[in-house]
Image: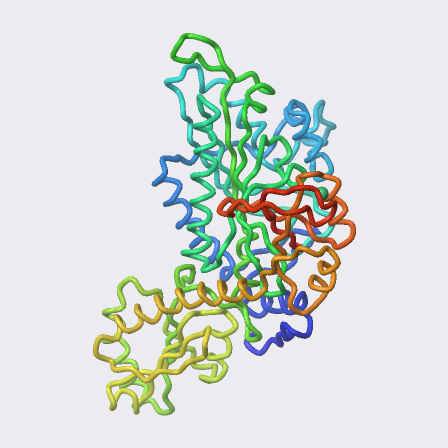
Amino acid sequence: MADSKITKRGADYSRWYTDVIAAAELAYQAPVKGCMVIRPNGYAIWEKMQRALDDMFKATGHENAYFPLLIPESFLKKEAEHVEGFAPEVAAVTHAGGRELDEPLVIRPTSETIIWNSYKNWIQSYRDLPLLINQWANVVRWEMRTRMFLRTTEFLWQEGHTAHATYDEAERETLTILEVYRTFAEEFMAVPVIPGLKSESEKFAGADHTYSIEAMMQDGKALQAGTSHHLAQKFAKAFDVKFQNEKGEQEYVFASSWGVSTRLIGALIMAHGDDKGIVIPPKLATTQVAIIPIYRKDDQKAVVMERLGQLTESFEGIGFKVDDREQHSPGYKFNQWEQRGVPVRMEIGPKDVEKNQVVLVRRDTGEKAFVSQDGLAATIREMLDQMQRDLFQKAVDFRAGRTYQIDDYSQFNPILDGPEAGFLWSHWCGSADCEEKVKKDTKATIRCIPLDDKPESGACIVCGQASETRVIFSRAY
Ligand SMILES: [Zn+2]
């Protein structure tokens, strides 16, 4: 519905988020709690994300494959940390074909186990390595508190699972993918991110160590937008996957795994949306330009539509839609495309045809421009590029304004509870106790130990012990 009311961000951010999703017709709650129906407007964003990421995976040597949804429960139990981490959120099929199964079948919460069970048959020698596989799939994690796109029981994602001959090579792969994710977030989503290492308590269950990219939302909270894990030899040992190295010795295989999910759509909404609704960055918009012809009489319509036909012939590479629905007024249509976050709106009426112009309105700024019909496609392409850059810059500036270097722990809660909450860069000694205390006192977690951070000696914000670098504390989604 085009006239859905959207709560103002400042009034109730969480309500705003839900309203935006409804108004843009992105998704709605399914009958099963925590599941969602993704509508075409929402799925179109995911398809754009998939295409861009898939191209980058292929360009870095990866291939797609597919592994089963159902995993024997015993597989999950083979890696101790993994099962401990995932057990609380696992769903399993216990009955099928009218009888109880001998062994429950887990619905994949992630696929390391089934994939490493397969790799046992794929890998014998160093010549079989590296193995660079990605899978596009759905997974199920039984979440207690769910939120559309951000945390849902079933979600769509990609999961990469690679196998390597050495620790260093697996490390390079883990970092290569982290860089792919950073590039995607910044260049396609127009969301600046901080790549970093997760603390021991925040790492993936079963990983040697985990890297993530962390983004800031407009309420100052962090959102983990992608993770890349170095699994060392843990899954190879659990599934007995060995290879013969160049010296003819048997050795366990090294691994990485990495993923991003439909939660990125939630990130997109919360990074760029405004009080009118979602704002889709041009590179992720299927409809980049909504064209609204304006006319009253039939003869005007003929003139406008004819010119429009000529103009759009040159729109190659631009995603556009002519909204010629007769039952709705132009005002209704403006509002609807705005709520759907379409980057540019184009209006053309009989007067514009006479003057050889059209009206272009940018979704993010609301700026209205009268532009010549000559070279229109180029003008639009330029506008889309400019908008893509501006969205990114705006997000960079926003984050800069909400970033604090804090050396006094008593400032944590006042900032995090205040209207200007954000990322707190503070020293941390590396102890899990200090990390846990901050979490208990402030609900903030260590988002990451930034990779690009320069070493700086200081004192732990909690205990005062020596620290070599600042880490990022923030409340998070
Ligand atoms: Zn400490």
Report the residue at 65% width, 64% height from top: 421
Asked if residue 54 lies left or right of residue 207, the reply is left
- The N terminus lies in which quarter of the figure? bottom right
- Asked if residue 434 lies left or right of residue 225, the reply is right
Front residue (pair 393, 116): 393
Quadrant location, ligand no. 1: top right
73 over 295 or under it: above or below: above
In the rendered view, tell whether residue 306 sits above or below residue 195. below
In the picture, measured across the screen, residue 384 lies left or right of residue 71, that is left
Which residue does the image show at 40% across and 73% down from the upper left? 344
Q: Tag count in the figure?
A: 0
For image coordinates 47% across by 67% down, the residue present is 394
List the single residue furthest toward the left: 374
Residue 385 image offset from top left, x and y in percent: 34, 66
- Which of the pair 197/146 is nearer the observer? 197
In this view, 355 is above or below 95: below
Residue 69 point in image, percent of width and height: 57, 35
Q: 294 or 14, which is in the foreground? A: 14
Q: Quadrant of residue 86?
A: top right
Q: Nearer the viewer, residue 432 or 427?
A: 427
Percent across and percent down for residue 321 are 37, 70
Q: Percent from the top left, x then y, of residue 325? A: 43, 78
Most extreme residue toward the top, as rendered?
248
Tell me what residue is drawn at x 70 percent, y 50 percent: 461
